[in-house]
Amino acid sequence: MKTIYSGFEAIAVMVLTLMVSCREGEPASIPVITITSPFENQVFNISDTIRVVADITDESSLVSVMAVLTDDHLVSVQSPVFFYPQATGNYNLSAIYPISNTSLQTGDYYMLVRANNESNYRNKYQKIFINGLPLQFEDVVVLTEKATNLIHVSSISEYGTVDSLFEIYGDYASSESDSEHKRLYIAGINFINLIAYDLQSAMIVWTKDVEPPLPVHAPDCLHFDEELFSSFASYDIFGYLYNGSVTFTASVEEGLKPSRIFKFGEFLIADLQSKTGDNNFIATYYLVSGSEKQRLANYFKVVDFFALSDDLVLILANDNDGGIIMEYEPQNNILTDVVEAQAALICSVKVSETEFVIGTDNGNFIFKAGQASLAPVLQGISPKRLRFDPANQKIYSAGPNLIKVISYPNLTVLDTYTLTDSILNFHLIFNK
């Protein structure tokens, strides 16, 4: 049967259609946020609680509200907290937000409040200032060779007390420490790939299984700079978060063995050693993709990399004639000789922005950036490893079975810790 509308009904249908069309064409509403606490540039300390107060209004119903602390690049530095208004367009946020991340550095941060409706959101940032915790030394973690394929891990407190932590069955290639997460990372040669230990519980947090070809790693294959980077004796360089998830991968051709590696800005720099006696290379990889940017042929082996500035790397290496110190520009792939040492370099440590202590097989030296000379220091001490404690201005020097604590810049011996077994490596642990 055909439907017949009266004139009034037809007009009503037309008006309703126009109203719906107009609504569909209107832009969706966006929440309005007014933050009243914290106030702009308010100062906080680590472990303080931020009182977050904000009035949020919306023509639509609010779905969720989030509060989170970000750094000055607007990247979250703590976990967010969420709130769920019950079908209302007016919401008063009142919450406490503890500053729990003890690794935060002193500087500017933002309290972010984010409000969502069904189709839109708005972010509102309030700038604050946080005083970070001062760096504090906690203890020394020492790895010693207890027996063949048995690694013993112990700690030495600032008072010289030695405590046994745990033992590891396997061969040793390298180790690194992570003070923020209280981790000790250990790499092996044939029986260990990677193991991450929790230093507080002495328990294994995660492991990576050994995969052929062997050996898995070369000596000093690990590098830690907020993330752990590991170079393998064949084919690969990996980067890991503290929880073991992979964040970086780069491939290396079969004839080259990646040795020392170094995170520098947006790059990872690797010393690629030839397995056949041909050229070695300094290779630069993009951290974001793992693809190779460039390489530079050479005939030396890197002992250490250090950052001199935002665009300049200091390279300490050995060639057939002994030690050599160079400056490298990754952006331009330019290498410049600075000074030669009349001995092979063994270890080194950065003690200031421009000053380095270097151990060689013919004594120890101070090198200052910008100067083409080495000044002899620490006579009678033969370090195999060097570490620096910036909180107390002390240098730690490890010999075969003892560790000397040395003041800086006076360079006088303050204490000596003697171990019963041969020292493989040691690390300084701080509060962050």
Image (tube, grey):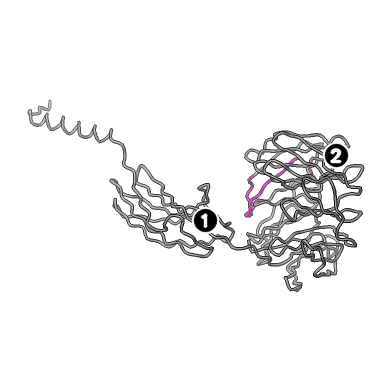
- Residue 171 coordinates in the image, percent (x, y): 81, 56
CA separation in Å, label 2 and label 1? 45 Å
Amino acid at circle 1: Gln
Position of residue 374 relative to residue 399, above or below, is above
Query: Which residues, given as a range, are shown in magenta?
Result: 232-247
SS label for mark 2: loop
| Residue occupying the far front of the picture | 371
Q: Nearer the viewer, residue 293 or 146?
A: 293
Residue occupying image coordinates x 81% and y 34%: 297
Describe residue 130's horizontal placement relative to residue 196 as left or right: left
Query: Label 1: how many residues lie within 10 Å, few (<14), some (14-19) or many (20+)?
Result: some
Mark nearer the N terminus (2 vs 1): 1
Q: For residue 57, which numbered disc appears in the image?
A: none
x, y (%) of residue 154?
76, 67
Residue type at the position of mark 2: Lys
The residue identified by callout 1 is 78
**Which residue is disc 2 drawn over?**
275
